[in-house]
Image (spheres, grey):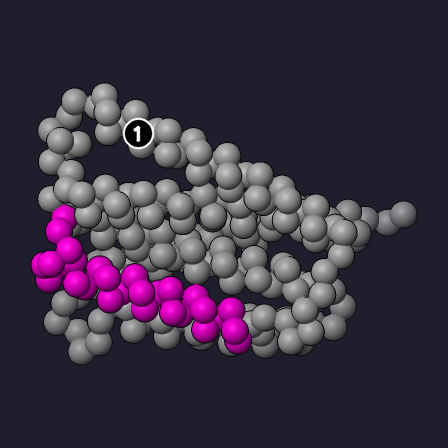
Amino acid sequence: MIRILIVLALAGGLGFSLASWPLGWPFGAGPAGLGLLVVAGVAARGIWNRDSTSPPGSPERTLWVLMGSSAAIATHLLASLWRIGPEFELNTDAGHRLGIDSWSLVLGMGLAYAIARDPNPRSDERDAWIASRGTHWTSNTLASLVLLMAVVLAFEPTEEIRRLSRPAIAHVAILCVILAWLVGTLVQLYAYALDHAAAREPA
């Protein structure tokens, strides 16, 4: 569980840092984030390949990559939307910058997965059960977030809500999807952590 929280905190910190990236630097936040995710994928693969005792299985490797990447993407999107404000528009410098950075992080997630994935994918009934729990939590979280978003948009009278542009609302909806996906991966990783802890206990 501690490792999950550490990776989650590091990925979240990366996302927030990228959202406040200085404009004058020679390379943007997106390429920097892409490079860091690739480095993380290489590091994870090296660690798992050296672990001869109990390396994570194929589904668990995928979950670690997805959890770290989606946490970085979610925090970057959240912080960027907060900085830009409710009047966010796509055809602006801020909109173009957010698009480039977001798609660069998505590409980094794909490359990190391709690097760190198990070269011999395999799964069993335990993996299927854990995946079903993740799907359950993902769907319920997404439904709850969409319902909350609908209630806030329909009944919240604050000036900030009234000023929300359509692109801003669309990006908030995307953020809800990423957060739901993140919750699902966290639930599955926690299930694997409990399983590993039980396996280490003496009979």
Disc 1 marks a residue whose amino acid type is Ala
Residue drawn at x 47%, y 58% is: 68
**Magenta segment, which residues?**
88-115
| Residue nearer the viewer, 203 or 121 | 121
**What main secondary structure does the magenta stretch of the protein show?**
helix
Residue drawn at x 49%, y 55% is: 67
| Residue nearer the viewer, 73 or 89 | 89
Q: Position of residue 30 (x, y in %)?
A: 28, 68
Q: Is residue 28 left or right of residue 23?
A: right
The answer to whether any part of residue 2 appears in the image is: no
Residue drawn at x 47%, y 36% is: 141
Q: Is residue 92 left or right of residue 189?
A: left
Q: Position of residue 52 (x, y in %)?
A: 74, 73
Q: Which residue is mark 1?
A: 150
Q: Is residue 185 left or right of residue 175?
A: right
For residue 104: magenta?
Answer: yes
For residue 105: magenta?
Answer: yes
- Please determine whether, in this image, residue 147 is positioned above or below residue 187: above
The answer to whether any part of residue 76 appears in the image is: yes
Residue drawn at x 70%, y 46% is: 129
